[in-house]
Image (tube, rainbow, N blue to C red):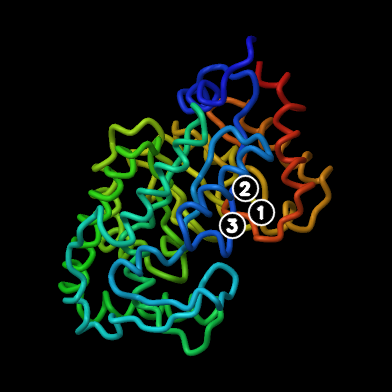
Amino acid sequence: MAQLSKRERVEAALKGDPVDRVPVAAWRHFIPEERQPETLAAASLAHFHEFNWDWLKINPRATYYAEAWGNRYDFNHYDSVIPELLEGPIATSADLEKIGRLDATGGVFAEQIDLVRRVKAGIGDAHFLQTVFSPLTVLSFLASHPANPTIAAFSESQYEGVRRFIHESPKAAHEALSNIASTLGKYAAAAVDAGASGLFFAIVKLAREGILTEAEFEEFGKPYDLQVLKAVEGAAFNMLHICGPYAYFDAVLEYPVHALNWATIGQHNPTVAEAGTRTAKALVGGVDEIGTLQSGTPDAVKAEARAAIAATGGRRFLLTPGCGTNLDVPSENLRALREAADLAAVAVQ
C-alpha cells in the first residue's frame, strides 16, 4: 500500500484500518531540560526527530501536578525522575481540606500549556499527547513525605500516605479528589485547545494488586478518572497508561480512550495477544523497557518487537515500550525499536 504520513498511520492504527507499517514511538524524561518549557520542548522534539517516531508523548516533570497544590522541590537533587521534596502542605488527613479547585490555566498549568504550544509549533502534522496523571495519582504525590530523598522512599511513602488518607478520612478524600479532577479536566481541555492531540492519561502504579484493593480503586480512582477524561472526550487521540505490575487491567477497559498502554512483558499483566481478546481498543506496547530495551541487544529488541507485531497481526497496534524508558537507555536499542517497525512492514499489509 502507499506510504502513509505519521498522522495517517497513527489514525489508521487507532481505527483498526490497514497500515503501511505499525506506528512506533518511545518516550523518556529529560533532566534538567524539564524545568523550563522552552528547553523541554526542544529536547522532546529532538528525540522525536532523531528516532523518527510516529507520535510524541510529552514527558513533563513528574511533580508538576503536586507543585500546583503547593509542593516545593529541589530540582538540583533528583533520584531517578523524582526531585527532592522540600515542603509539602498535605501531611495528614486533616490537611485534605487544603486541596481546592485551582485556576487550570494559571501557575504551573500555564507553563505546561506554553510547553504544548511550543511542541505544536515544531512537530508538523504528527500527533502528540500531553501527560496528565490521574487524580488519585496526584493525591498520592501530595501524600508522599519520604524519610530520605530516594525514589524507593518516595514510592513507599506515596502508597502508605494515600491509603491512610482514604481510610482515615474517606469523605475528605473524595472532596479533594473531586477538586483535583475538576481542575485537571479544565486543564486537559486547555491543553487540547493549545494543540495537543489528546492525553496520555496515567494511573501511576496505583491500580494494581498490593497497593489498593480493586474495591478501593473503583471507589477512589475510577469516578475521578472518568471525570477528567470526559472533559477531552472529543479529542483526536487519548491514551490510557495503566502503570506497574499486577495491574487491574479489566477495571479500566471501558474508559473512554482510543488506546491502552501497559507493561505487556514480565510484569504479570496480560500479553498483547491476551489483551486483544478482551478489548477492541488499540493496544500500545509490546517491548520490555526494564529488561530488553535497557540491557538487551538490538537484535533482542527487534525480536521482541516482531513477536508483538505478529501477535496482533499488526492491526490496531502501536509498537512502544510498556512505560517510559530510563534516562540512559541505549540509543542503539531505540534505533532497533524503530527499525523493527520497518522490518515487519510486510506482515501488516
Q: Seen from this angle, which residue lies furthest bottom?
A: 147
Q: Measure the C-alpha gap from mark 2 to mark 1.
A: 5 Å
For discs 3 and 1, the disc positioned in front in the rendered view: 1
For the residue marked with disc 1, what is the amino acid? Glu
Q: Measure the C-alpha gap from mark 3 to mark 2.
A: 15 Å
Mark 2 crowdedness (10 Å alpha carbons): few <14, some 14-19, many ≥20: many
Asked if the residue at tag 1 contacts the one at tag 2, i.e. Cβ–Cβ closer than 8 Å, the answer is yes
Mark closest to the chain's N terminus, 3 or 1:
3
In what element is the residue under mark 2?
strand
Compared to residue 61, the image places residue 274 above or below, namely above
Quarter of the image with the C terminus is: top right
Seen in the image, is 278 located left or right of residue 314? left
Compared to residue 51, the image places residue 135 above or below, namely below
Seen in the image, is 127 located left or right of residue 335? left
What percent of the width, then of the height, locates residue 243? 49, 57
What percent of the width, then of the height, locates residue 215? 31, 63
Asked if the residue at tag 1 contacts the one at tag 3, i.e. Cβ–Cβ closer than 8 Å, the answer is no
Asked if the residue at tag 2 contacts the one at tag 3, i.e. Cβ–Cβ closer than 8 Å, the answer is no
For the residue marked with disc 3, what is the amino acid? His
**Residue bearing mark 3:** 268
**Residue beneath the point at 75% across and 34% down:** 339
**Residue bearing mark 1:** 289
Quarter of the image with the N terminus is: top right
In what element is the residue under mark 1?
loop
In what element is the residue under mark 3?
loop
The circle drawn on residue 225 is none
Mark closest to the chain's N terminus, 2 or 1:
1
For the residue marked with disc 2, what is the amino acid? Pro
**Residue beneath the point at 43% across and 77% down:** 73
**Residue bearing mark 2:** 321
Mark closest to the chain's N terminus, 3 or 2:
3
What percent of the width, then of the height, locates residue 201? 40, 49
